[in-house]
Amino acid sequence: MVKSFRYTNALGLPKKLVVAEPNAEGKYPVTLWEMIHGEMCGSGAMTKDELNDYLDHFGIKERF
């Protein structure tokens, strides 16, 4: 794991985005977790710009 980010979504659910080391294409594999029950909500891969857009959307000040 490179980094993780915690936030609350628009429905009031606590979430955690876990970001791993970049893959061969330069994208960062990510997993999204719901923190009340510890369930995985999804996974994928994002560029650094996509990650920062995601963080902006949820009001996370920290940059990747």
Image: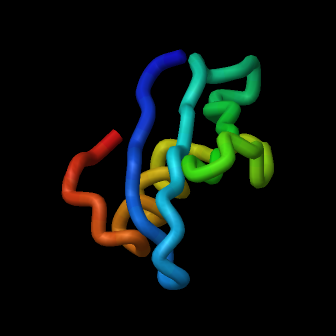
Does residue 28 appear to the left or right of 51 in the view shown?
Answer: right
Say which of 3 and 47 sits in front.
3
> x, y percentage for residue 27?
66, 34
Q: How many marks?
A: 0
Residue situated furthest bottom in the rendering: 10
Does residue 48 appear to the left or right of 23 in the view shown?
Answer: left
Locate residue 19: give its quadrant. top right
> Relative to 30, is 11 above or below?
below
| Residue displayed at 20% across by 58% down | 61
> x, y percentage for residue 54?
49, 63
| Residue displayed at 58% across by 52% down | 36
Q: Is residue 32 visible?
A: no
> x, y percentage for residue 8?
42, 66
Locate residue 58: give its quadrant. bottom left
Which part of the image, by quadrant, shows the N terminus? top right
> x, y percentage for residue 47?
58, 45
| Residue displayed at 44% across by 65% down | 53
Locate residue 43: give its quadrant. top right
Which part of the image, by quadrant, shows the C terminus? top left
Q: Is residue 23 visible?
A: yes
| Residue displayed at 67% across by 47% down | 37
Say which of 27 and 40 sits in front.
40
Does residue 55 appear to the left or right of 44 in the view shown?
Answer: left
Colour mapping used in the image? rainbow
Residue situated furthest front in the rendering: 37
